[in-house]
Image: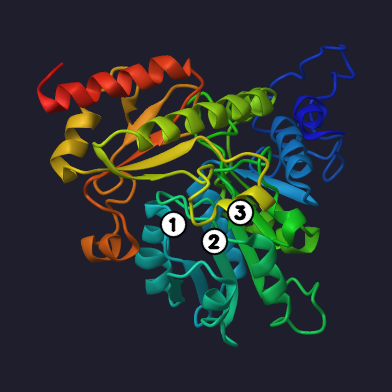
Amino acid sequence: MKRSTMAIHIGQEPDPTTGATVPPIYATSTYTQEGPGRHKGFEYSRTNNPTRRGLERCLAALEGGADACAFSSGLAATDAALASLMRPGQSIVAFSDLYGGTYRLLERVYRTWGLDIRYADDTRPDALLSLVDQSTRLLWIETPTNPLLRILDIEAISVALRSRRPAEADDPSGLLLAVDNTFASPMLQRPIELGADLVIHSATKYLGGHSDLVAGAVVSAREETLQPIRFHQNAAGAVPGPFDCFLLQRGLKTLHLRMERHCANALRIAEWSRRRPEFSSVLYPGLPDHPGHEVARRQMSGFGGMVTLSLAGGAPAAISLLTSTRLFACAESLGGVESLINHPATMTHASMPPEVRSRIGVEDGMVRLSVGVEDADDLIADLEQALRAGSGNP
């Protein structure tokens, strides 16, 4: 099957009991057993639930993985991966441009827990691998990154990483590559096919696509790598409810259609933004002069729906734009059908110290657009009127 077909059919087979085309939502906490240990594969919904299981099957298929675990949020998925795979005294190598919530979790939870966190500022594989030593268990990257939309070459990093692994390369206790694929979704990029071991999603974003749920997921290339994550999930209990799983699975059915429109609209806005003197920089991987454009063309089937802009007037101009748009809602999150505008320095990346934000390039005059699926002309008109309002000429 092609992925657009998988999203509609895998894990969503007609109900065998009634023939219902859309499977029912299993809103149950427990399951009646024929006797102790004699059941139909389900005992308690923290451990497993048929609605969640259908969602996990679909996510694994879309990412080309062996299996998946769905979580109550993207950070719950990240936390489970770190807590189950890492031990005090080990190290994580991460690319420095990453979601502020991930940075907060690494620095304020896992560093105090005893992990050594190392950050690379250079996208080249050699820069990441130069920080790897015998203590390193995990490489953690986003691509495109949040919010600077930098592109990392997943396949090149994977090839370089394999040279550092022991001969038993399939050993799940070895060095692993985890890729946060939230910004791309499996419709645009499939890290496991490029050599990644784990794929992480904030499913709240493009996978759900309607800003009406919070969820996360871990997809693994190998079942044995997922086993400790699944164990941690059952032990700690950060599971999504069946209604959220249903909404997420419903969102997946239109993911391929939405991503086409997100990409087309984002490119229109990026090209328009480049002609506006109010913006000192326009970051979008689909622009030919973007530093990661060629890598993005090779490993992605589209350039995504995120555009990051820097205002020539600095923070005051950014705040004016944020408070003057009418269609772009000033809000956290991304990936929904509606367009959002965000100020990374005070919103998604506020948990980063100012000196860290400055070092990686998150400026106070920067705004991040999550371009929705509205008509592109209307979105551009909204940005135009917001810029006029900021100049005093509404």
Residue 227 seen in the current view? no
Q: Residue at x 54, y 74 (%)?
A: 128
Q: Position of residue 137 (x, y in %)?
A: 60, 76
Q: CA distance from mark 1 to mark 3?
A: 21 Å
Q: CA distance from mark 2 to mark 1?
A: 8 Å
Question: Image height check: is 51 above or below 376?
Answer: below
Label 2: element kind: strand
Label 3 vs label 2, nearer the camera: 3
Q: Residue at x 29, y 55 (%)?
A: 351
Pointer 2 with pointer 1, Cβ within 8 A: yes
Q: Position of residue 82 (x, y in %)?
A: 55, 64
Left or right of residue 177: residue 99: left
Q: Any mark on residue 98, and which? A: 1
Left or right of residue 336: residue 4: right
- Answer few, some or many: residues within 10 Å of disc 2's Cα (few below 14, many 20 plus, some between 14 and 19): many
Q: CA distance from mark 3 to mark 2?
A: 18 Å
Q: Which residue is mark 3?
A: 294
Question: Image height check: is 347 above or below 324?
Answer: below
**Mark 1 / mark 3, whichever is N-terminal:** 1
Q: Residue at x 51, y 34 (%)?
A: 305
Question: Image height check: is 310 above or below 58?
Answer: below
**Mark 2 / mark 1, whichever is N-terminal:** 1
Q: Which residue is mark 2?
A: 141
Q: Residue at x 53, y 46 (%)?
A: 288
**Mark 3 / mark 2, whichever is N-terminal:** 2
Which amino acid does the dot numbered 2 rest on? Ile
Question: Could you say which is closer to the camera, residue 59 or residue 155?
Answer: 155
Which amino acid does the dot numbered 1 rest on? Leu
Question: Could you say which is closer to the camera, residue 160 or residue 295?
Answer: 295
The N terminus - image quarter: top right
Question: Image height check: is 141 above or below 41?
Answer: below
- Answer few, some or many: residues within 10 Å of disc 1's Cα (few below 14, many 20 plus, some between 14 and 19): many
